[in-house]
Image (cartoon, rainbow, N blue to C red):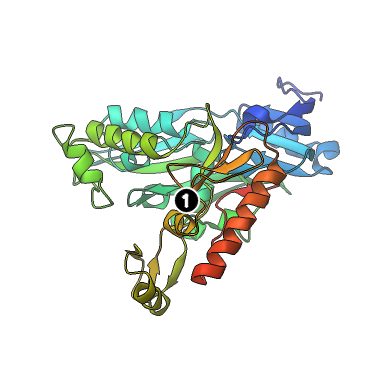
């Protein structure tokens, strides 16, 4: 590719290090760009634009079941800039290729509040705005101001304000009607310098208190400790974290289940709906720790599917589909993957 930019087009490129399941598949082409100018140039190349395009982050929400016949794009845009700062808050402009947990760590050390509950979530900043990542009572949408994007078909830039992103539980406009149409280049976050912490979810307050003073650093330590106790390190055991989204069901359905299963946990979602932990449902169906071939359900957290070594994407997909069927038969609840399957 001729340009003034140092863009490398890599052919028949292994994606094993670009998906946290560590599935050994290859992409026909792989390109990492370092800035918006390079991305715009790539999208203007006719030979590339005619091929199937897939933009990926850290690969923590991907399951490849076969080689990818097309072009994989990956962001190398890495910066954290202060856009606005007052005594009460700071607004940051963050490149899409910044590692998410590195960003959280950076903000915690500055005592900028709002994302400490999202510590240790794998992936990159760009993906956080697509997935609306969440944990321990906090979601990315709570702190995102806006996102800058490039439209794939035209190469034109477009900014989406928070309310235009249609955020909901683990969802956004970029996962639905605009899926595959825009690439996020950078995200703006508003973090607070003052105010209360969000400690209402689960045992977070209790675990933080064990560390001493309730402050932002101890909250991060507590979240990391809780996640480490439940979730396997993807660098050691291939996994994508929570494979399924927690289902949201009508209150009336929950009340019927409560009569049959008095111990069923739930979280209030709205006046008419409740959220039920998918991990609990899966565990009640007997899947926790169960292995089929080289794919298995984690023995500490049933929400996590793992690659025990050499698993194919199809093995993991088959396991996930079997789990979905079990939950549907036992509870009458559909659970859906948080992971994108290719």
Residue receiving disc 1: 132
Residue nearer the viewer, 309 or 242:
309
Picture mark count: 1
In the displayed structure, would residue 325 be above or below residue 311?
below
In the displayed structure, would residue 130 be above or below residue 9?
below
Residue 13 in the image: state x and y as whole percent: 76, 27
Residue 44 in the image: state x and y as whole percent: 77, 38
Residue depicted at 36% across the width and 36% down the height: 229
In the displayed structure, would residue 120 be above or below residue 175?
above
Direction from residue 20 to residue 252 in the image, left or right: left
Direction from residue 4 to residue 158 in the image, left or right: left
Say which element carries label 1: loop
Bin the neighbour count of mark 1 within 10 Å (Cα to Cα): few under 14, some 14-19, many 20 and up. Answer: many
Residue nearer the viewer, 216 or 223:
223
In the displayed structure, would residue 306 be above or below residue 17?
below
Residue depicted at 48% across the width and 41% down the height: 187
Residue 22 falls in image quadrant: top right
Residue 81 in the image: state x and y as whole percent: 41, 30
């Amino acid at each position: 590719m001729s340009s003034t930019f140092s863009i490398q087009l890599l052919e028949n490129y292994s994606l094993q290090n670009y998906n946290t399941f560590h599935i050994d598949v290859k992409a026909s082409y792989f390109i990492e760009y370092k800035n918006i100018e390079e991305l715009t140039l790539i999208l203007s190349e006719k030979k590339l634009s005619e091929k199937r395009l897939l933009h990926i982050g850290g690969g923590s929400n991907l399951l490849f079941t076969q080689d990818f016949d097309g072009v994989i794009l990956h962001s190398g845009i890495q910066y954290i800039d202060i856009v606005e700062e007052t005594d009460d808050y700071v607004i940051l402009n963050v490149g899409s290729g910044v590692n998410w947990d590195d960003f959280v760590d950076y903000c915690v050390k500055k005592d900028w509040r709002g994302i400490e509950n999202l510590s240790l979530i794998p992936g990159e900043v760009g993906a956080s705005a697509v997935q609306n990542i969440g944990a321990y009572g906090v979601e990315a949408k709570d702190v995102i101001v806006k996102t800058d994007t490039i439209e794939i078909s035209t190469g034109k830039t477009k900014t989406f304000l928070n309310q235009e992103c249609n955020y909901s539980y683990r969802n956004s406009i970029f996962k639905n009607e605009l899926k595959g149409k825009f690439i996020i280049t950078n995200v703006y976050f508003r973090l607070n310098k003052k105010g209360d912490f969000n400690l209402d979810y689960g045992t977070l307050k209790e675990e933080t208190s064990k560390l001493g003073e309730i402050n932002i650093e101890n909250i991060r330590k507590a979240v990391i400790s809780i996640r480490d106790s439940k979730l396997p390190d993807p660098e050691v055991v291939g996994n994508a974290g929570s494979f399924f989204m927690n289902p949201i069901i009508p209150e009336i359905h929950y009340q019927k289940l409560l009569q049959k299963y008095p111990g069923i946990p739930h979280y209030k979602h709205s006046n008419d709906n409740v959220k039920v932990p998918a991990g609990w449902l899966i565990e009640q169906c007997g899947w926790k720790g169960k292995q089929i071939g080289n794919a298995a359900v984690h023995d500490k957290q049933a929400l996590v599917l793992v690659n025990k070594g050499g698993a194919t994407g199809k093995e993991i997909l088959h396991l996930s589909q079997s789990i979905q069927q079990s939950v549907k038969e036992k509870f009458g609840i559909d659970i859906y993957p948080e992971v994108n399957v290719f």
